[in-house]
Image (spheres, grey):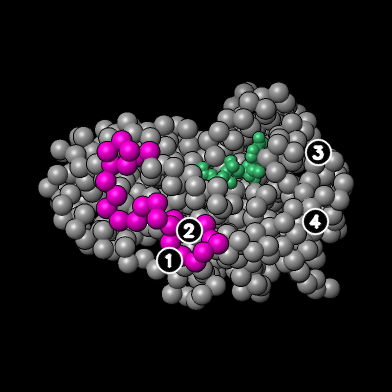
Amino acid sequence: MAHTTDSTSAQNVVGGRKVDAVDGATREIVNPATGATIGVVPEGTGADVERAVEAARAAKAEWLDATPGERAGVLLGIADVIDANREQLAQLESADAGKPLEAAREEMDGCADVLRYFAGAARNLEGKAAGEYIKGYTSMVRREPIGIVAGIAPWNYPLMMAAWKLGPALAAGNVQILKPAEGTPLSLLALADLTRDTIPTGVLNVITGDGPNVGQKLVEHPAIGLVSLTGDVRTGKTIARTAADTLKRVHLELGGKAPVVVLDDADVEQAVAAIRVAGYWNAGQDCTAGTRIIATKGVYDRLVEQLVPAVASLKVGDPADGDEIEMGPVISKRQQERAFGFLERATAAGATVLTGGSNGAGPAGGSFVAPTIVADVTQDSEIVQNEVFGPVVTIQRVDDYAQALAYANDSRYGLAASVFTENVGRALDAARRLEFGCVWVNDHLTPITSEMPHGGFKESGYGKDMSMYSLEDYTQVKHVAMRIGI
Ligand code: NAD
């Protein structure tokens, strides 16, 4: 039977049933481009976590018995549901997270792709050969699911970050409880509803609520064996501390402050085109956003000359106005004020705003920040060292390659970096020296693919999303040794 969704009164999905919060509480969901309420969802508590854990427990044994081929079939089925409902899900995502509709459509395609990747990966787990490593015994390695795993998603790519967790969790044979960010639950709730006939009962449970009342309770729960978070560094640290009490595994995809190193021999047009996307895609609310441009002195002036008009030309507005809108609002008034605060403190300290600034943009009522470039910033300044999470990019002039790499690596974050150069040897050297989980050469942000790992170094966290590395993170290894008889 096909289910329909109603974005104005979405419900949780627990044990295959649509349910309200145990205590009946609700939260209004707001469109950040207009300030209008677009939905009402359950607002959970620890009681919702308990109910979801019971549903997951009940589903665990049967899902463990599913063959990799059967698990793959379920993941392929979810991907097909996303394809079939692409427009509806994209519309929900666009309205809930304030992103251009075309970008939201692409994200739906990305969700389907990653689930199809993990459908294939489920059937391709590899390990050490069984053998007689001890005389008289045959040893073998089993890679087993962890059991019940929890996924906690952020608001910047609501469904895609959930899909990055759902794919490896189910492929590896785990049952899962997913919590979307409290402000952006509509797409995941819709998908959970649409897939009630596709996913075996209780294998995926989606519950809404905020960090302290639901997220924290998931992390504390002794029946849950792994918590995967995509979110802020501070949240990751809190989760790791809490998880220590039950020694559960944590998988942390946290913030970033990606450098874009542009060297004297770079193709400037290529760098400008890449930065116009990398700094401002999703209104800069991307953990891999290119937010720190570091240019050597021979290219700095040419880069600024071309980059400033390119960034100023970005079309900002309410995504509902049409496909020509390239950048929507930031997620909330709070996030807007946060970005303006960074800009005010930076300019008070001597920084120069080359374009944009704290003048806002887009329709009244929405939480817009104009695409901004800030120059004359020191390496130790707040705006260079901390994640703004908005369309705000700094540009720094450095003497040479060595200083560029030193500045790039001088960060507590280590998620992504890029280098622009026409010198292959330099590119290889930079790829080795940059202390980040992902390094791009002559591009930034767009080359992300399901087959390759995504995850950070340093305070950007540990554990990988996508790729076989992620599937391994969602499994545990067992050694079985058997005495040989005759
Ligand atoms: P956030 O940390 O505020 O919230 C993320 C999720 O954690 C939400 O679902 C929230 O309810 C939950 N949460 C908050 N406190 C919690 C607690 N104490 N216990 C358990 N759960 C808790 O992050 P956000 O503002 O939603 O997302 C933006 C952040 O995510 C940025 O820092 C960004 O860089 C990061 N991010 C990282 C990646 C990556 O792949 N590394 C991808 C996207 C976003």
Q: Relative to the observer, which residue lies in front, 68 or 483?
A: 68
Which of the marked residues, 3 or 4, is nearer the chain's N terminus? Answer: 4
Mark closer to the observer (4, 2): 2
Tag shown at residue 13: 4
Up the image or down, 50 lies above or below 70; here it is above
Is residue 23 rendered magenta in the image? Answer: no
Query: Please, what secondary structure does the residue beneath circle 1 have?
Result: loop
Pointer 1: what residue? 316
- Disc 4 versus disc 2: distance between alpha carbons? 33 Å
Report the quarter where the C terminus lies.
Answer: top right
Q: Which mark is residue 46?
A: 3
Pointer 2 with pointer 3, Cβ within 8 A = no
Q: As shown in the figure, which amino acid type bears the numbered disc 3?
A: Gly
In terms of sequence position, does the residue under pointer 4 or pointer 2 come before the other? 4
Residue 91 seen from this side: yes
Secondary structure under tag 4 reads strand
Q: Which residue is mark 2?
A: 368
**Dots 3, 1 in contact, CB < 8 A:** no
Secondary structure beneath label 3: helix
Q: Residue at x 45, y 32 (%)?
A: 458
